[in-house]
Image: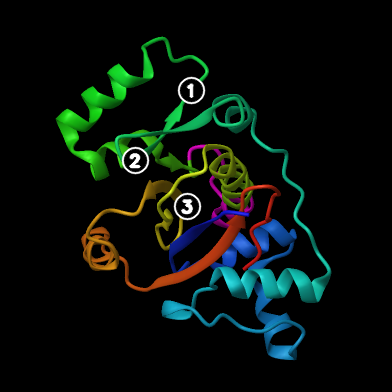
């Protein structure tokens, strides 16, 4: 049974207390009191901000699951679409696409080169959909789970790279591993200006779905 490796390169999140308070439907001062009393742990991120792990731990302690209606824009644009593998890259095809796949992929690669062509085609900004950075995490994980399902469908032969950029807002992008490997990715991390990049991997078997669990 063949597997594909998916590597996640996530910029450590620095999430404000006000966004956590908004999601929990309490005041920022209540959050501060809870931390002082030991009800919830304090932030461990850069400049006293909450990391994604901090927020998920707090939700677990409070037995709280934020309710968010999955945005219709994601359902239409992304859940109706599919991945294709072309010329050593992975590309997202919208159901509205009218041009032959070979034509537009070739044109995109010719103009921007393979790595940048994937980034131009595959990036998703979550902040225009919802402004609260913590709710963006939930939508991001939903989209990543769907991307994993689609990766299983196209069965790439190379490692898949999912970038989860920005220290506050969420920006997702998916690529296939470049020929230069990890050295290229490390340089790309610096190009993106990541203060701290959290790297993890999962193995996805082609015959059943693995949920994103970090």
Distance in Å between CA atoms under marks 2 and 3: 23 Å
Mark 1, Cα crowd under 10 Å, few <14 / some 14-19 / many 20+, is some
Label pair 1/2, CB-CB below 8 angstroms = no
Q: Position of residue 169 (x, y in %)?
A: 46, 53
Viewer-nearest residue: 171 or 67: 171
Q: Is 41 placed above or below 153 here? A: below
Q: What residue did someone put label 1 on?
A: 94
Mark 2, Cα crowd under 10 Å, few <14 / some 14-19 / many 20+, is many
Mark 2 / mark 3, whichever is N-terminal: 2
Picture disc at residue 72? none
Q: What residue did someone put label 2 on?
A: 89
Label pair 2/3, CB-CB below 8 angstroms = no
Q: Select label 2 or label 3 by which is in front.
A: 2
Q: Select label 1 or label 3 by which is in front.
A: 1
Q: Position of residue 199 (x, y in %)?
A: 44, 70
**Residue with the most extreme right position:** 63
Mark 1 residue element: loop
Task: Classify the position of the C terminus by image quarter.
Answer: bottom right
Mark 1 / mark 2, whichever is N-terminal: 2
Q: Position of residue 124 (x, y in %)?
A: 44, 40
Viewer-nearest residue: 70 or 113: 113
Q: Residue at left 44%, top 64%?
A: 10
What range is drawn magenta here?
128-138
Q: Is 194 placed above or below 150 here? A: below
Viewer-nearest residue: 50 or 22: 50
Q: What residue did someone put label 3 on?
A: 170
């Amino acid at each position: 049974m063949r597997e594909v490796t998916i590597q996640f390169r996530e910029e450590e999140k620095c999430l404000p207390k006000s966004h956590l308070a908004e999601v929990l439907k309490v005041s920022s001062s209540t959050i501060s009191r809870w931390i002082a009393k030991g009800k919830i742990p304090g932030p461990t991120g850069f400049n006293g901000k909450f990391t994604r792990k901090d927020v998920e731990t707090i939700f677990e302690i409070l037995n709280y699951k934020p309710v968010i209606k999955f945005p219709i824009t994601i359902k239409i644009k992304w859940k109706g679409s599919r991945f294709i593998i072309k010329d050593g890259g992975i590309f997202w095809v919208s159901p509205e696409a009218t041009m032959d796949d070979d034509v537009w992929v070739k044109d995109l690669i010719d103009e921007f080169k393979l790595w940048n062509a994937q980034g131009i085609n595959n990036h998703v900004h979550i902040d225009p959909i919802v402004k609260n950075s913590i709710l963006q995490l939930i939508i991001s994980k939903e989209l990543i789970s769907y991307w994993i399902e689609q990766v299983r469908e196209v069965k790439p032969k190379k490692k898949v790279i999912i970038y989860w950029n920005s220290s506050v807002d969420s920006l997702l992008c998916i690529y296939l591993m470049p020929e230069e490997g990890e050295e290229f990715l490390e340089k790309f991390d610096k190009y993106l200006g990541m203060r701290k990049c959290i790297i993890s991997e999962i193995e996805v078997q082609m015959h059943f779905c693995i949920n994103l669990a970090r």
